[in-house]
Amino acid sequence: MSGGAVLVTGAAGLVGAEVCARMARQGRRVLAMVHSTPDIRTVDGPLHAARVRVVSGDVTAAGLGLDPTDSLVRQVDTVVHCAATTNFSEPDEVYRRLNIGGTENAVAFAQRASARLVHVSTAYVCGKLDEQAGPGATFGESELDRGQRFNNGYEASKLEAERIVLDAERGGLPVAIVRPGIVCGHSEDGRITDRRNLYLVLKLITEGKLRTLPGRYGATLALAPVDMVADVIAHVVADGITGRTFHAVGRDALSLRDVSDVISEYPCFDINRFVPPAGFDPGELDRRERAYFDRVARDYTDYFVRTVRFDTTATRELLAAHDAALPASGRELLRAIFDDCLRVGFLADGLRSVDEAVASVAAGDAGGRR
């Protein structure tokens, strides 16, 4: 085992927090870099570990805003770069500054420290691959740019970030890339520390505020339980892997038909309908539903038409070496997610209303950072 320290950017995010916990359990010293949120919270609660030191940093700054004279900073031999904005509707400048510029700074830090870089990307760098390669097209772990178009600036920025990482690899930097799918609750019981993005759409659907959406029932969502994503990253770090890319997605592709069928199992939920995109006119929605569609759902409808499948050969081999396997990510996982949301009151009375949740996203409340 390496005697150096592991720097985790985005340590307060969903994935970063779980990675910090696993690094500590491996006996590694962890420099948990946060920006605006000082607390690191995992699905098991706040992280308090003697081997984890929380430091304030900034991925948009040279040297990641860290003190170069700090003894632990000087001992970093692995950088796990999780920090990014995962919102789909940011201005291009935000993606350029956080996702692309942040990756450039993480690469530069790793190069100066002679450290290895584990870069956390997204499986959706595939973009609209099925648009050109046909329904059900498979996106390989070793593939990146196939001339695909993108649904949003987030996907495009993450592909550009991977290009930066691969350019650095060709220059001699040891790197590995992990591409999560749609990060969601724990594979066993659906627990999660922050319910944003797709969760908010599900909330609007099950509360009857989004009754009609453009989509195809055969479209698939690649769910990625947060514990599995963190396990893959931790194994990559522990095994000293470089030169490989891993699709951290669950075993099963969840279709929109699956989503509708599971929603129908809950008497307290409203059921929406998906209509072919060509026949969907947001102008025909009533005033309230149109507002929810424009403010929230519009950013996610492209994910309701895609049928891309993700190769997981390298990921399955990695997990098998640790006596593990890809977790279920179909109807069973969706039920666990719904049950957890009901338990904490996210899909029922108890927590803030959907209007409050939408308002917090619009105001940028802590949000959208992995």
Image: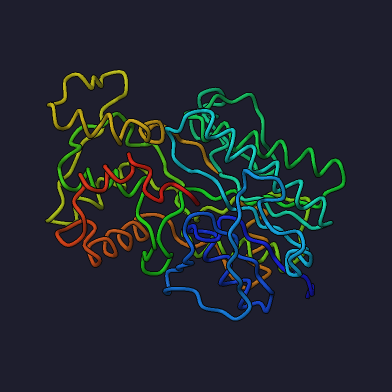
Residue at the spot 24% in from the left edge and 58% down from the top edge: 346
Above or below, 267 against 6 in this view is above
- Place of residue 37 in the rendered image (x, y in percent of width and height, measured from the top left): 47, 59
Toward which corner of the image does residue 149 lie, by quadrant?
top right
Toward which corner of the image does residue 68 lie, by quadrant?
bottom right
Above or below, 30 against 139 in this view is below
Residue at the spot 43% in from the left edge and 56% down from the top edge: 329
Q: How many marks?
A: 0
- Place of residue 351 in the rendered image (x, y in percent of width and height, measured from the top left): 21, 59
Residue at the spot 48% in from the left edge and 49% down from the top edge: 369
* Quadrant position of the N terminus in the picture: bottom right
- Place of residue 180 in the rendered image (x, y in percent of width and height, measured from the top left): 55, 50
Relative placement, left or right, of 107 versus 369 is right
Relative placement, left or right, of 14 versus 331 is right
- Place of residue 354 in the rendered image (x, y in percent of width and height, measured from the top left): 21, 47
Above or below, 258 against 230 in this view is above
Above or below, 359 against 329 in this view is above
Residue at the spot 42% in from the left edge and 44% down from the top edge: 221
Q: Nearer the viewer, residue 275 or 248?
A: 248
Relative placement, left or right, of 7 versus 272 is right
Relative placement, left or right, of 222 versus 310 is left
